[in-house]
Image (spheres, grey):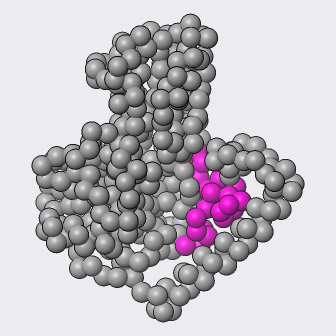
Amino acid sequence: MFKIKKNDFQNIHYNRTKAPFSLRCALGVMEFFYKIIINFKNFLYEIKILKEKNIGVQVICVGNLTTGGVGKTPIVTMLANKLSKEKKVAVISRGYGAKISNKNPIIVKDLKGIKFKDGTMCSDEAYQLAKKVNNNVVVIACSNRVKASEFAIVKYGIDTIILDDGFSNRKIKKTKTILVFDSKMKTGNSHLLPYGPLREPLSQIKRADEIILVDKGDENIEEAIAWVKKFNLKTSICKMKPSKIYQMNSKAKIKLNNQKAIAFCAIGQPTQFFDFAKKYYNLAETIAFDDHHKYQKSDIEYLIKLAKNHEINTFITTQKDETKLLSLTKNITKYSFNVLELENELIEI
């Protein structure tokens, strides 16, 4: 009845477009039942019928209430690198989008190095983490957080687990929970799935210990800070800004001259990446694939066709997308696939 893509849901969730009345009614009914299920699950944990498993080590969860990318990966990286100076750290990622099964632990990176050539097999998020963390940090992808954590403890003697995402997963007992919010998107239309982006009711913020607000160049950042402070939790702001642009395969730093380019990505909040890209390129087109999109040869052919139409030879994408594009672009010399790298700073407010 309704032909709607993942990015269309994003637009509805974050008030960019208004859904037809019939679709809003259908989404409202589904949201009602989703809310009943989520509230009942949380109630069972609160009265101890369902119990979180204590695995005997420190477990830090970096999660979010909403769907889509809010900027957790840089925060997980910073936290892992800081703690690994004194602790034996493993980062557990869900492994969403991995070609191999994530029901059992996938060792993406151990103490000897990264085990995959790119992110297509093990998931782009896990591979990106593996590239950014210190040498002594283990990265594991698995949908079962308890199984993955216990595996890391036994195999590597880990004493600190960092969960990349996992706020809604209450099967494992957390020592500390950090919730991450996007300063521009916040909670979108404040509806639960599938009508809105919320995975949990806002009332569940009470389970968090602190909040990190990710500032991606928000001109209304003071308003966002005032909004997040109403939750009365320890709050920090993570400032993100471009650090450099490099060629995907050669890694050579690009000298910028406002040239024409096509920007494309497959991330949760593509408009924020496009805003950054516009500062450095004259964008002929912006292409947003669905989050976690698995790139195929046909996608590259489509992008090159667009470039030919615009008589340009430059593309700009994200580091997350880079992990899935390396093998598809390595033999392409006529076109330059460039990557925007971001740096971040955490400031308590």
> Can residue 191 be found in the magenta stretch?
yes
In this picture, residue 198 sits left or right of residue 325: right
Residue 277 seen in this snapshot: no
Q: Residue at x 57, y 42 (%)?
A: 290
Classify 63 as above or below 51: above
Picture layout, residue 333 above or below residue 79: above
The residue stretch that appears in magenta: 182-204
Residue 165 percent across, percent down from the top left: 42, 60
Q: In this orientation, which residue lies closer to the viewer: 313 or 299?
A: 299
| Residue 46, horizontal then vertical, whole percent | 50, 87
Left or right relative to 31: residue 223: left
Residue in front for this viewpoint, 144 or 228: 144
Is residue 227 magenta-colored? no
Q: Residue at x 48, y 92 (%)?
A: 49
Q: Is residue 5 above or below residue 254?
A: below
Percent across and percent down for residue 29 are 78, 69
Most prominent secondary structure in the magenta stretch? loop
Q: Residue at x 49, y 60 (%)?
A: 64
Q: Nearer the viewer, residue 47 or 349?
A: 47
Image quarter of residue 197: bottom right
Question: Which residue is found at the position 27% from the left and 79% from the top?
Answer: 55
Counting the numbered discs, the total is 0
Can residue 131 be seen here? The reply is: yes
**Relative horizontal placement of residue 143, taking residue 200 as reference (left or right):** left
Q: Quadrant of residue 143?
A: bottom left
- Quarter containing the N terminus: bottom right
**Residue 145: image location, x then y, percent:** 35, 69
The quarter of the displayed image where residue 246 is located: top left
**Left or right of 192, for residue 144:** left
Query: In front here: 300 or 134?
Result: 300
* Residue most extreme to the right: 21
Q: Is residue 329 above or below residue 175?
A: above
